[in-house]
Amino acid sequence: MISNKFFIYDNIVYLIYTIADFNEMKESFLKEIQNLIPCQFGSIFMHVPPGQEDSLTMPICYPKEFSGVEEEYLKLRDKDKSIWLLNSSDLKVFRVTDLYKDSERHKSPIYLKCFQPFHLEYAVYIYLFYENKHLGTVSLYRREDMADFSEKEMIILRRLAKHLVARFHAHDNLRPQQTPQSSSSRLYHFAEEVNLTERELQLFLSLTPYISNKELAKKYYLSEHTIKKHLQNIYRKTHTHSRLALINLKNKLLLGEDFFFPLN
């Protein structure tokens, strides 16, 4: 279980930074996150500049048949008591059950119009911020027959949220080196410093403890011998001596810290 979830987490981080089309990246994130954090439905809102009629754009939703949840939410947004959190300047990840008692929540217009018709009971919201600026919101929902989001799942989402901030920040045309979550710029600066080729960087980003040289060769239409040679060059340039050392180095560049996967 741990190995499978580690692989999924690593793949999500990889797709956040490497899928060029921003909307495609968001949809891919919503598809893949459901393999790591089981949920019925997910959405991502973009935040638009102040002064426009509504500060949120229509979201990307997956699966699309649940888009009615967010369509109803936009009609009732002024009744959302969690909006006060947008006055904060920091990244926020919270469960709807952290804010309301069940008795209060089940009587709210948002629950009656958005949750109940789609048999949803629980939600977790990720408010993405950079320097007092709200970049977007990620929402994940669970059915009434599922348990609420656990503390361990919240830890994982907080870690992933840092990467989303970095990607959203870059998309917002701010200089990546100015963001405190400049994971992508840190990684590419490192690649330039050690003189990784484009192919070597591609393989470096693709490494996980559970992908073999044979799988890498198939993915990139190369021979296993060529993959081995590329990896030897990467070891030499990065002064590492094992696959796990390379993976740890990658995670430190992306997260700014040693990687710890908080699952039993």
Image (tube, rainbow, N blue to C red):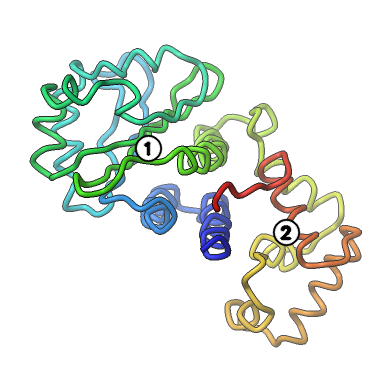
> Which element type, helix, strand or loop, lies under badge 2?
helix
Q: Amino acid at mark 2?
A: Ile
> Residue 15: where, in percent of width, then height?
52, 56
Which residue carries the number 2 mark?
A: 247
Which residue carries the number 1 mark?
A: 138
Query: Whole-Å distance between the Cαs marked 1 and 2?
Result: 27 Å
Say above or below: 125 vs 38.
above
> Which element type, helix, strand or loop, lies under badge 1?
strand
Residue extending farthest to the front is 264
Question: Is 61 on the left-hand or right-hand side of 168?
Answer: left
Say above or below: 76 vs 16.
above
Q: Residue at x 86, y 70 (%)?
A: 233
Q: Residues within 10 Å of mark 1 (few under 14, many from 20)?
A: many
Q: Quadrant of residue 126?
A: top left
Residue 75: in sight, yes or no? no
Say above or below: 176 vs 144.
above
> Residue 193: where, in percent of width, then height?
86, 49
> Residue 160: where, in percent of width, then height?
53, 43
Along the viewing direction, whichever of 172 and 246 lies nearer the viewer:
246
Q: Earlier in the sequence, mark 1 or mark 2?
A: 1
Q: Quadrant of residue 14?
A: bottom right
Question: Is 236 on the left-hand or right-hand side of 146?
Answer: right
Q: Residue at x 18, y 42 (%)?
A: 120
> Residue 85: where, in percent of width, then height?
39, 16
Along the viewing direction, whichever of 237 and 116 lies nearer the viewer:
116
